[in-house]
Image: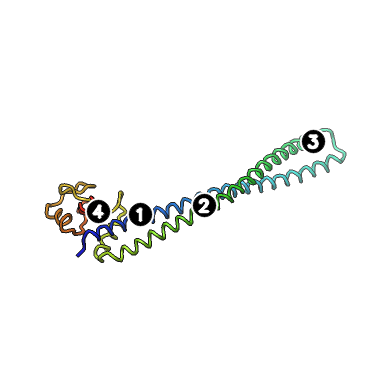
Amino acid sequence: MPGIDEFLRLRELASMLSQASAASEAHEDELNRLRKREATRAETLTILDAFKFEHRTLASRLNDIEHQLSQRLVAETQARLEDEGLALLMRQQEIDRAADEARTFLGGYDKTLTELRVEIDANLAQARLRRDEALARAAALREDLPADWREKFDRVLAKKLAHGPFSRLTNTRCHFCQHAVSKVFESEVDVLLQLKACPGCGRLLLPHKVVAG
């Protein structure tokens, strides 16, 4: 007949599943951290590509202007081309400065990203290990529980209740939802050690011996 040990296993099972979930979240957080850094690098490379394209376009237009200025032109046309060429040269210088800054940033960022990848890889490995260990322990605990206890636990767990799947009775009332039960019901939980769910919130009720322990 199930007793205190089964309740303790049940509580530990919930704890292991919670730890596995937390480890999975930590794993995803680390991946997201890496994705954001890599996205920044990719954006910088895209900007550099745009600078290169604009620089080539400007160089091509400047060559055209230089060729036109080598010919005999009316004063107005020559002045217009010279003004355009000067504006293009100034823009070209702006692009060169911005590209140099982007390349300098990227050089330092790549070094930082390489170091970050090493750190994140280590964190990912730790998170996977914690998750796998918790899941392995949870699987072992499940095997030691009566089949009907596993079914009840799975039903409650599927509800994803806030603050966990367990509650307790205090003066015939559920600690969480304050649903009132009979003295007989309370005795079946606290004295007979029967696994019951609160009729109000659906949480599994732990005997006082387990809660106090």
Q: Is residue 91 left or right of residue 76?
A: left
What residue does disc 1 label?
Answer: 18
- Say whether disc 4 or disc 3 marks the residue closer to the N-terminus: 3
Crowding near the residue tagged with mark 1, few <14, some 14–19, many ≥20 C-alpha atoms within 10 Å? some
Q: Secondary structure at mark 3?
A: helix
Determine crowd level at label 2: few under 14, some 14-19, many 20+ residues with C-alpha closer than 10 A: some
Dot 2 amino acid type: Ile
**Mark before the other along the chain sequence, 3 or 1:** 1
Helix, strand or loop at label 2? It is helix
Residue 207 at x, y percent in the picture:
20, 54
Q: Mark 3 and 1 residues: CB-CB less than 8 Å, in contact?
A: no
* Distance of label 4 from label 3 (alpha carbons): 82 Å
User: Which image quadrant for residue 65?
Assistant: top right
Task: Name the residue at 27% across, 64% down.
Answer: 145
Label 4 and label 2: CA atoms lie apart by 38 Å
**10 Å crowding of disc 3: few (<14), some (14-19), many (20+):** some
**Distance Cα–Cα, label 3 vs label 1:** 72 Å
- Labelled pair 4, 3 in contact (Cβ < 8 Å): no
